[in-house]
Amino acid sequence: MKNTYRTALCVTLFGESHGDMIGCVLDGLAAGIPVEEEKISFALSLRRPEGNLTTARREEDDFSIVSGVLNGRTTGAPLTILIPNKDVRREDYAEMQAKPRPNHADYPAYVKYHGCEDASGGGHFSGRLTAPLVAAGAIVRAALEEKGILVASHIARIGSVSDARFGNVKTDFERIYMKKFPLLDENVRTEMEKEIAEVKAVGDSVGGVIETAVCGLPAGVGEPWFDSVEGVIAKAMFAIPSIKGVEFGDGFDLGKMRGNEAADELRIENGEVHISTNHMGGISGGITNGNPILFRCAVKPTPTLGKTLRTVDLNTMENAEIQGKGRHDPCIALRIPVVIDSVTALVVYDLMAQTYGVDWIVK
Ligand SMILES: Cc1cc2nc3c(=O)[nH]c(=O)nc-3n(C[C@H](O)[C@H](O)[C@H](O)COP(=O)(O)O)c2cc1C
């Protein structure tokens, strides 16, 4: 099992949903980056379940940083974040060891790890492991912010209810940056909540779409071909459990557009190059063009349902049924914006370090 991501900044993720601890190691951070525990706590609070439209599992995410920080700054040595699991209930998942939940990692993990995997609550595949990514992302996000690079997402869709699309990203950011339920149009919130409540009431779940922007990146970052900026962001997004689609700029809509509609025309303004529109999502040839990076992620409906679904019994090798026990999110899209922002920040940090050197962030 490989759990390390990227090159200049390596992120290794460890732990299981109902094990003792989850955490991550960040290797390759520059020395001297401020590490503020309040900022990490705040970011974790944005991911934490709250109210009756998210899972009933309640974790305090009482993290500790056990290496790589001295006197409030990174030392340049690997930084290790530990988060204990406290609200653990392994017994809820006993049946799933033999009866894999449709759309969860249970069956493929059973085949790959010969039944030795920890299947409780999805084990190592659980959305719970996104908490250390949010903690790590908070450190990097704050450092990028100092350099004028901001990452933010909003909930573009839940089921049949859509938010507005990004317009002027800089002003849009004022409404969504570091918000718990980030929306460009607050008026759609009630409808979204209603749709989640409706699926929850019948033991079902609902998917969503998250739209993300990165502002302040200069033109010229990234590599052509195999390490394109689209490629590295998409790879990182697909690592986040439940993300099943990623599109950049106008994405799949480009397939029905004319070239002149999609053209992001260039002009000179005050002696600088400007690109008027952003159909390409800020990336051409795999390299940033100076416009905000824009992308959308499709988040699938939660696999574990209160409804009964058909599955198999791997012990008896007979057909079987399963009804989800345990505590589950009826809509993952509600909790995922800060996860996407955090993982995007880690990728952006990595891209910048590759382009400008590891110490770029502290100069
Ligand atoms: C923040 C977050 C919360 C999640 N909550 C649940 C949940 O309550 N129940 C569930 O079955 N899956 C949940 N998931 C999704 C599963 O972890 C995911 O579908 C599973 O690991 C399979 O991975 P895949 O969807 O990428 O194929 C959650 C994911 C995230 C990111």
Image (spheres, grey):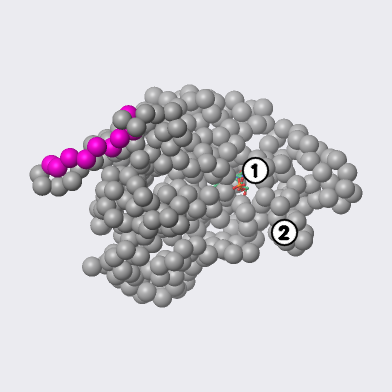
Q: Quadrant of residue 187?
A: top left
Residue under the point 73% across and 50% down: 107
Give the image location of residue 244, x and y in percent.
56, 42
Q: Quadrant of residue 26?
A: bottom left
Give the image location of residue 348, x and y in percent.
37, 56
Image position of 253 (left or right of 267): right
Q: Nearer the N terminus, badge 2 or badge 1?
A: 2
Give the image location of residue 122, x and y in percent.
66, 52
Answer whether residue 336 is magenta in the image.
Answer: no
Residue under the point 86% across and 52% down: 315
Q: Observer-nearest residue: 171 or 15?
A: 171
Residue 112 tag number? 2
Distance between the alpha carbons at the discs numbered 2 and 1 = 26 Å
In the image, is residue 40 above or below residue 152? below
Q: Circle 2: is it few (<14), some (14-19), or many (20+) Cα within 10 Å?
A: few
Residue under the point 60% across and 62% down: 15
Q: Amino acid at mark 2?
A: Lys
Q: Which residues are magenta?
A: 261-269
**Of circles 2 and 1, which is in front?**
2
Mark 1 Cβ inside 8 Å of ligand 1:
yes
Image position of 168 (left or right of 155): left
Q: Quadrant of the N terminus?
A: bottom right
- In the picture as drawn, the residue positioned furthest to the front comes out as 259
Q: Quadrant of residue 146?
A: bottom left
Q: Secondary structure at mark 2?
A: helix
Mark 2 Cβ inside 8 Å of ligand 1:
no
Q: Quadrant of the C terminus?
A: bottom left
Q: Observer-nearest residue: 362 or 135?
A: 362
Give the image location of residue 17, x and y in percent.
62, 55
Answer whether residue 268 is magenta in the image.
Answer: yes
Residue 327 tag number? 1
